[in-house]
Image: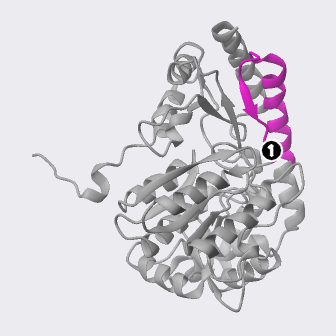
Amino acid sequence: MEYKFSDKVSGLKASAIREILKFTSDPEVISFAAGNPAPEAFPTERIAEISAELLGSDPILALQYSVTEGYGPLREYLKTWMTSKGCFHSEFDDLIVTSGGQQANELSCKVLLNEGDTLLCESPSFIGSLNAFRSYNVNLVGIEMDDDGINLEALENALKTEKNVKVLYLIPNFQNPTGRTMSQAKRKAVYELACRYDFMILEDDPYGELRFSGENVPTIKSLDTEGRVIYSSTFSKLISPGFRTGFVSAPAPIVQKIIVCKQVSDVHSNIWAQVICHRFMTSVNVPEHFEKLRAIYRNKCGLMCSYIENGFSDQVRYIKPDGGLFIWCTLPDGCDMNEFCTKAVRDYKIAVVPGNSFSIREDEKSHSFRLNYSTPTNEQISTGMEILARMTKEMLG
């Protein structure tokens, strides 16, 4: 039988990252292609303790249906925490718990955009969100980036020339895939453009607490006085991605629509995980926990960067991040990046992600590739980066 798929999904393709990860089933392959938190970052003992306490004292709370908005104590905790960060304005915002940051971004798009409306985003950008946006047949337009974030001139030009611009999607902190951080000046300028051209900003911030160097930069949401910013984040990089617990802080009318859409999607997010998140965040020394995570990634990033700086071909440029999980490397224009990535995993047993996996358009060329330092062990980083460094010199001189 020939199956005819809906227009919303017929153009969607499997993530190139997932395809590359298939190579990692080979035990000889060292993968720098994933984006998982470091195994040593998981607070397994405390999670086990809280789980045992919960299932022993109040199992029905963890096993019964719950409300779509999210576990009440967790929502109140998040409102207080987000208020302290300037990401929740009690006079006009509300907050909903979602199934990870991915659902937060997908539902935000669903409630705000019609087919054919324009969504602007950084180019390159996170493939998971891009596919979510594509599933609603929006006009997805990428805006080039500078070292300190989105190019303002290109952004304003798109605002003047593209029709029905409704949303600008940004990852301002340690952007996936480039690791870049948007400057405070650009955050202010972007918000001013939102006010002038009347569009919403979707600020995706899964890595904000993972800054391990440099000065903290306030969120765009903290600048929001007109209810123009939707702020999404997640516990995936702070406690556990398997919990699938994220959240959205946004103007109340938008959150109310997200609630309705979520009800027809999954009813509510995993209540057991929500309770664990709340009890974890209210029973541990949170600054100490976050600093432990930062120390892990500071060390791993520094180790990986040392091999780039001291071993890679001089023709490879890279962006050294101040946090997050990723490093963005760029090959010279004459080098075939896809062939480089294929050769790396096929011949050298090192998996990296080709830059065009994060492109907005299929015909968009990229000379870059993404490295992940959070998932591999320090030993794998040392071994793999030594091999990758040798490869760059053999290919590029």
Circle 1 sits in a helix, a strand or a loop, which is it?
A: helix
Horizontal side, residue 40 vs residue 265: left or right:
right
Q: How is the image coloured?
A: one colour
Q: Position of residue 93 (x, y in %)?
A: 65, 85
User: Is residue 311 in the magenta section?
Assistant: yes
Quadrant of the image occupied by residue 354: top right
Measuring 86% from the left and 59% from the top, which residue is drawn there? 216
Residue 109, above or below 315? below
Front-lying residue, 318 or 9: 318
Task: Let me know if residue 229 appears in the view.
Answer: no
Residue sitting at x 70%, y 8%: 397
Give the overall secondary structure of the magenta segment: helix
Q: Nearer the viewer, residue 353 or 365?
A: 365
Residue 6 shown left or right of residue 293 in the figure:
left
* Three-letter amino acid code of the residue under disc 1: Tyr
* Residue at mark 1: 297
Say if 227 sits above or below 114 in the image. Answer: below
| Left or right: residue 332 compared with residue 346 | right
